[in-house]
Every structure is written in C-alpha cells, then in structure tokens.
Amino acid sequence: MKAKPVKLIKGEGYVACKKDEATHLTINFPSPAGLITLPVMIGGTRKGTNNWTWDGDTEKPTLRPSVKTTNHSGLCCHSWVNDGEAEFLSDCSHDLANTTVEMLEVN
C-alpha cells in the first residue's frame, strides 16, 4: 500500500480506516521527507479547507496540490504525487531534484 487512509480520533491519534472515512492520508516519500500524514478529501472542492484532494487510490495515489516539506535542518522536499510516483521539483535541496521516483510502501 502506497497510501494509507487514516482518520484522526481525539485522544487516540491517527487510526487506520476505510478510504471513504479518511480525514488524512499517510504516504512515504523516497526522500528526506519520508513518512508524512496529510489532511485529505476525496472529491469536492478543497477551497478554504487546507486539505489535499486525493483520488482514493491506495496503490497509485494522486494528490493535489503539490507537497512541500522543510525539515529541521532546512532541507526542502517539493513534489507532485501522480499515479503512485513522486515527481521531485527543481527547488528540492536533495539529490532527487528533477527526478520521478515510485512512492514507498506504508505499513
């Protein structure tokens, strides 16, 4: 599984769930960003929600908009997630900039 649907439950944290119940999605980048969990929605309009749209696919996920992270040491990772692959953009400050790599499994 390349994308793990989870829901945030008060007092428990992120709990695995069916994709139609997901409030968040855990993905694993093959980069310094590593494992991250993002607020998502399937369908509808994301305007004003601060969510990413997710196509509902757990094996070859597509997310919108792009995902940009910066770690504690200032390392930037910026990519599009399309059909289960991370397309790392030129503003990445790691060796995978300008490459496309398959997303890693999430356990």
Image (cartoon, rainbow, N blue to C red):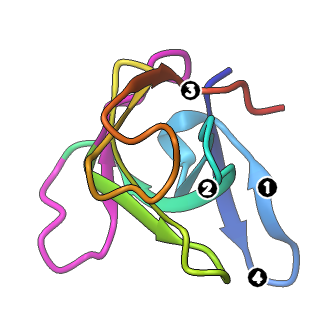
Give the CA distance from mark 3 to mark 1: 21 Å
Q: Is tag 3's residue or tag 1's residue first in the polypeptide sequence?
A: 1
Residue 4 is inside the magenta segment: no
Q: Which residues are magenta?
A: 44-63
- Label 4: which residue? 10
Q: Is residue 21 left or right of residue 56?
A: right
Q: Nearer the viewer, mark 3 or mark 1?
A: 3
Q: Which mark is residue 33?
A: 2
Q: Amino acid at mark 2?
A: Ala
How crowded is the residue under tag 4: few (<14 C-alpha within 10 Å), some, or many (20+)? few
Dot 3 lies on which element?
A: loop
- Label 1: which residue? 15
Q: Amino acid at mark 1?
A: Val
Q: Quadrant of residue 106?
A: top right
Q: Nearer the viewer, mark 1 or mark 2?
A: 2
Q: Which residue is nearer to you in this view: 41 or 88?
A: 88
Q: Which residue is nearer to you in this view: 75 or 45?
A: 75
Give the CA distance from mark 1 to mark 2: 21 Å
Q: Is tag 1's residue or tag 4's residue first in the polypeptide sequence?
A: 4
Chief secondary structure of the magenta portion: loop
How crowded is the residue under tag 3: few (<14 C-alpha within 10 Å), some, or many (20+)? many
Above/below status of 104 relative to 98: above
How crowded is the residue under tag 1: few (<14 C-alpha within 10 Å), some, or many (20+)? few
Give the CA distance from mark 3 to mark 4: 29 Å
Above/below status of 43 relative to 101: below
Q: Is tag 2's residue or tag 3's residue first in the polypeptide sequence?
A: 2
Q: Is tag 3's residue or tag 4's residue first in the polypeptide sequence?
A: 4
Above/below status of 76 relative to 56: below
Q: Quadrant of residue 29?
A: top right
